[in-house]
Image: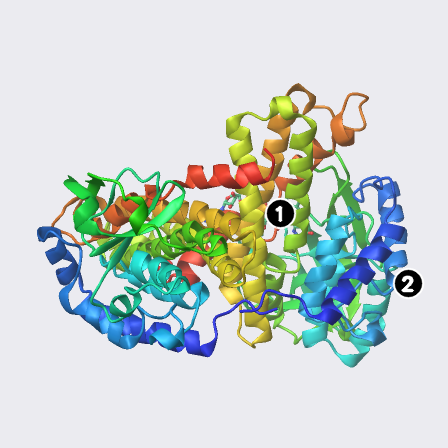
Amino acid sequence: MDLTWSESEQQFRSEARAWLQANVPANPLPSGDTADGFRLHQQWEKTLFDNRYSVVSWGEQYGGRGASLWEWLIFEEEYYRAGAPQRVSQNGIFLLAPIIFEYGTDWQKQRYLLPMAEGVEQWGQGWSEPDAGSDLAGIKSRADRVDGGWRVTGQKTWTTRGAFCTHLFGLFRTDPDQERHRGLSYLMMPLTADGVTVNGVGRLDGDEGFAEVFFEDVFVPDEDVLGGVNEGWAVAMATTSSERGLTLRSPGRFIAAVAKLRELAARMPQAVDARLADAITQVWIDAEAYQLSTLKTVTKMLDGQSVGAESSLNKIFWSEMDVRIHEIALELLGPLAELVDESPAAVDAGAWMKGFLFSLSGPIYAGTNEIQRNIVAERVLGLPRR
Amino acid sequence: MKFALTEDQVLFTEAVRELLADQCTPTALRATWQADAGTISRLWASLAEMGVLGLLAPESYGGMGLGALDVHPMLVEAGRVAMPDPIVDTAAVAVPVLASCQSESLASIIAGDTSVAVAFADDPVVRADTDLLLVEYGKRWHLVESASLVGVAEQSVDGARAMASLKALPDESSALNLDPTIAATIRARAIVAQSAVLIGLARHLLDETVAYVQAREQFGKPVGAQQAIKHKMSDTLLAVEYAGPLVARAAYSIDHGDPDAGLHASMAKANAADAAKLAARHALQSHGAIAYTVEYDLHMWMKRVWALASHWGTADHHRAIVRTHLGL
Ligand SMILES: Cc1cc2nc3c(=O)[nH]c(=O)nc-3n(C[C@H](O)[C@H](O)[C@H](O)COP(=O)(O)OP(=O)(O)OC[C@H]3O[C@@H](n4cnc5c(N)ncnc54)[C@H](O)[C@@H]3O)c2cc1C
């Protein structure tokens, strides 16, 4: 065991820290889940890209730095420590890109990765449908074979930032004779394509962070099938562990969140009773536990071991910790907790309530925590499925 | 950066696990409930022979010159079998402390002829079945014959723990001449070692329960196919998985003289005690009445958890230490 960073890693950290200090906008940007806020976030993504900080772990030809997983973790830690903006490119760079790297053709890599890193092309994830939520294999949107490609008909829903994205990737039924997880393919398409209709939907916080996407005979050429035809399920599952695990929510985010919570408590000592002090301490310990556990996971990954279903544990842990962090903050704020949208008396411009509302989605998206608990019980502990 | 045990550490731990599986059986454990001392006869000598007792002593004493990190996975194994012998006190705490002051007792401790229990000044009861007590009193540490201090026997809920209150206090003559930096690590060593045992106890409770709920059928299928049971098992694993790394990190901090070692130890105990208590609660509930009897082995593990979770500070107590550090 060695819990120290090498000299070059420390160097990487101090460079990232200095750059972030100099470049992170002094005032928080408006929410990236609104039209105006999204554009500002897109500009920020471009700034990151121009300094090769948008996708540090990618190769240089795709705008990255070829950073190691350790350096990626360090960057994330510094990023959240600096209070830098939310990553609106997240679904592209963390959910789609790993699939393109693993299954994509050379053409797909050349065509899609650089604009994604630059933030110019923004991707929405089209998995969920009205009748396919937890039971994702119930997907009905279908793609019919035509000359040179596919014609897509159907509907996706809950597409994060779909109203602002330029592109969509997702699962579609390419073989109508096969059922459930068989006969699905992973397709990519521009949301400007003929036959696509996108309707923004307000999330719990009122921002237009969701969208419904309708497809009417939308043509998708063969070159935009990612992975093999009818192999979409395997392609999708290959990357769920990175979504639930590391990339979606790196520990740096929670280390920064508990540090902010501690600051909040220090600013309002009269609100900190023994129970809240104990609760803050516990989330502090949990954030450290999450960080240490991530070090363990990354060590395993670099050692060539697979992480697999264990990433479900990760997802349960960070999402429930995030809810607790925000619940505690609201209790500290007491009667001021309800104030939002830069209301004059709001503390931190109402960010804690906003954060609380967002934290509540963590146990739902990326596979609900009930589903994750099933996965842990069945695939990690080996309990019978039925 | 590397957060993993070395191959040597893994291999040594496997050897210890095999030894324990062979000698520290549930039957042997049960027998200690009927005896006055919580020790399994051949086991202590075997551990000495294997080098486990001297793991943290320098090679010049016939030890292995290893650290808290090396011994902690073995303590997890000791917890897994609910080993009653004082391995935490003796091997993980007394040996490195006594080695640092060249104690004359060290050789016989490493050889397995002398056992030691550790007692902090604020412990209301101490382990009564060892030869020596390493006891804190008047801000100093003393090494004394147990018999000279140990008074009336106290009955623990865990029948394998021979506890007693003290009838006397050590005098100046038994005070050890400890380097203050070593003395400052004693509490952290004890708590980290105990936390490792708690992790092992929790793992066993989980493993046993997972096996049981697969075998036990009601309503025509295994009770483990019911989601209410599945989720209890997942929650137990979750708690254990996010306590383990805190324990390993605290052990590492002790070995590296990290000034935060005590803080890290308290973080470890807070999560390890809570995880083990959850494991015990879910194990009992998921077994039903079968686990609510002393005829069934599981109670010995649960009772060890309930004893250790509060000994040397409850989770709350340790959170309060962290909380002070956070300025809350
Ligand atoms: C903020 C947010 C962003 C999202 N972004 C996207 C996105 O970009 N792209 C996308 O495709 N999707 C997205 N989703 C959708 C998300 O993936 C789904 O909400 C999720 O998969 C659950 O599906 P559902 O909402 O239909 O709930 P349902 O599946 O209908 O579940 C309802 C309840 O029943 C429980 N339940 C269901 N099945 C079981 C079972 N077998 N055992 C126990 N309990 C069960 C669930 O846990 C839940 O509590 C997003 C969701 C949120 C909240």
In the rendered image, residue A334, in percent from the top left (x then y), is placed at 63, 22
Label 1 is found on which chain of the structure?
A
In the rendered image, residue B206, in percent from the top left (x then y), is placed at 33, 55
Label 2 residue near ligand 1, CB within 8 Å: no
In the rendered image, residue B14, in percent from the top left (x then y), is placed at 34, 74
Picture residue at 43% right of the left edge, 37% below the top: B316
Evaluate whether residue A211 shows in this view. Answer: yes
Towards the viewer: B198 or B275: B198
Picture residue at 24% right of the left edge, 68% below the top: B108
Q: Is the image coloured rainbow, by chain, by secondary structure, or in one colour?
A: rainbow
Most distant residue in the bottom direction: A106
Residue B75 falls in which quadrant of the image?
A: bottom left
Image side of residue A378 versus residue A284, left or right: left
On the image, numbered disc 1 is attached to which residue?
Answer: A130
Mark 2 Cα within 10 Å, few/some/many (few <14, many 20+)?
Answer: few
Towards the viewer: A172 or B302: B302
Sequence-first tag of 2 and 1: 2
Labels 2 and 1 share a subunit: yes
Q: Quadrant of the C terminus of chain B?
A: top right
On the image, numbered disc 2 is attached to which residue?
Answer: A50
Q: Secondary structure at mark 2?
A: helix
Evaluate whether residue A133 shows in this view. Answer: no
Picture residue at 25% right of the left edge, 61% below the top: B81
